[in-house]
């Protein structure tokens, strides 16, 4: 090829890249999504690696606006980011609001995405677990409520730990029996074939809930926060829940908070500790970020960091796929 033809080809490539950049700048893609698009061959190669890293990911526990707490991104904007990153599906969680109804609107606005919501049994819906609210959640248009969590921030266990005078919302009686209203919510989850999650229950409460859900024949039972803060379980407790048919949630957030972060009040979990948890039984576990806090990394950046750290700890690609793709996707009914 002569020099003039080489120059013409080089100029053509440069002009094409520049034109693509202009088009992308004018398109309604959020800042993080824009960062995934680059202008030279080396950056494009990096972009493709990122896409491969996150392709098919399913994060089913993260917090976005609108909410009663400050968040780093809104649900609609996050779904655009997730599409750009190659996510398979997302399920939002709000401690105070019913986000499954908003998921219906987001799916209408962004055709082809898989956006779901969930429902937390907190004080905004009453002073005890609200059976009527659970029934209405699963009946909402679109069938996009794919998880009902037991009380989270208003859980009796958390209130007691924090030394509050007011009682939180209980899931067990004084004699350790699962309360009738909780059993009814389990039955609603079972009939709808959606996730029943233990929320911010204590490890002991979670085992009792899992045992009862197993007796009722529920397929999608989740132990929440099994590696986090005051909800951390022993390995024996985790295995006990798995034997009773539960899936175990391991959140990446504890690996990011702590000294030097914007959430310094919590003790950081080492990557080795985190990897040891997920090694217990990847076939019955999944990873969520639990991110979205205004002071913490963007959930997509957190998920990417999590996968890279698991790789560095020697977790196999097959196990990673189970943890961040197949198991969470099955739990919310995406992966059959």
Image (cartoon, rainbow, N blue to C red):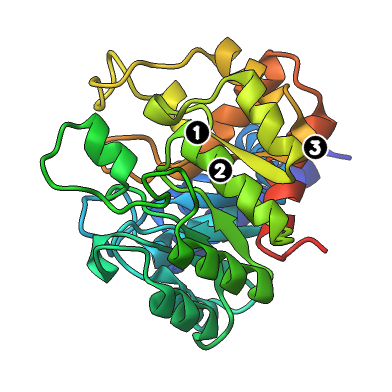
Q: Are marks 1 and 2 in contact (CB under 8 Å)?
A: yes
Q: Considering depth in this image, is 71 or 94 the residue closer to the camera?
A: 94
The numbered dot on residue 283 is: 3
Q: Of the residues under marks 3 and 1, which one precedes in the sequence?
A: 1
Q: Disc 2 on helix, strand or loop?
A: helix
Q: Which mark is residue 208?
A: 2
- The answer to which of 208 and 163 lies nearer the viewer is 208
In this rendering, position of residue 42 left or right of residue 171: right
- Whether residue 152 can be seen here: yes
Q: Residue at x 32, y 35 (%)?
A: 296
Q: In the image, residue 288 lies at what x, y percent?
A: 55, 42
Residue 76, given in percent of the width and then of the height, sits at 41, 67
Task: Assign a secondary structure to mark 1.
Answer: helix
> Which residue sits at x=73%, y=22%?
279
Compared with 236, 139 (above or below) is below
Which mark is nearer the camera, 3 or 2? 2
Image disc number at residue 22: none
Left or right placement of residue 250 versus residue 169 in this view = right
Marks 1 and 2, how far apart in space? 6 Å
Q: Residue furthest bottom?
A: 141
Q: Which residue is drawn at 68% across and 13% down?
A: 313
Q: Is residue 277 above or below residue 129?
A: above
């Amino acid at each position: 090829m002569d020099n003039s033809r080489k120059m013409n080809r080089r100029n053509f490539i440069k002009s094409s890249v520049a034109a693509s950049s202009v088009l992308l700048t004018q398109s309604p893609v959020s800042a993080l999504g824009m960062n995934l698009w680059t202008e030279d061959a080396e950056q494009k190669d990096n972009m493709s690696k990122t896409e491969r890293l996150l392709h098919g990911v399913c994060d089913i526990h993260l917090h976005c606006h609108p909410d009663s707490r400050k968040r780093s991104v809104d649900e609609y904007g996050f779904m655009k980011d997730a599409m750009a990153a190659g996510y398979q599906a997302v399920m939002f969680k709000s401690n105070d609001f019913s986000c499954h109804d908003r998921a219906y609107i987001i799916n209408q606005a962004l055709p082809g995405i898989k956006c779901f919501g969930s429902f937390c049994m907190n004080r905004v819906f009453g002073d005890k677990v609200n059976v009527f609210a659970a029934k209405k959640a699963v009946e909402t248009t679109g069938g996009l409520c794919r998880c009902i969590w037991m009380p989270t921030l208003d859980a009796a266990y958390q209130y007691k730990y924090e030394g509050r005078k007011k009682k939180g919302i209980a899931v067990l009686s004084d004699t350790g029996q699962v309360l009738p209203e909780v059993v009814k919510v389990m039955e609603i989850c079972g009939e709808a074939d959606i996730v029943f999650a233990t929320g911010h229950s204590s490890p002991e409460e979670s085992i009792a809930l899992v045992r009862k859900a197993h007796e009722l024949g529920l397929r999608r039972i989740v132990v929440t926060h099994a590696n986090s803060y005051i909800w951390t379980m022993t390995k024996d407790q985790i295995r006990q829940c798995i034997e009773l048919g539960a899936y175990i949630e391991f959140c990446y957030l504890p690996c990011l908070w702590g000294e030097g972060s914007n959430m310094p009040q919590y003790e950081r979990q080492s990557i080795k500790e985190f990897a040891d948890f997920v090694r217990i039984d990847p076939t019955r576990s999944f990873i969520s970020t639990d991110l979205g806090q205004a002071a913490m990394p963007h959930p997509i950046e957190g998920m990417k960091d999590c996968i890279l750290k698991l790789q560095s700890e020697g977790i196999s690609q097959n196990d990673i796929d189970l943890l961040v793709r197949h198991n969470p996707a099955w739990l919310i009914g995406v992966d059959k």
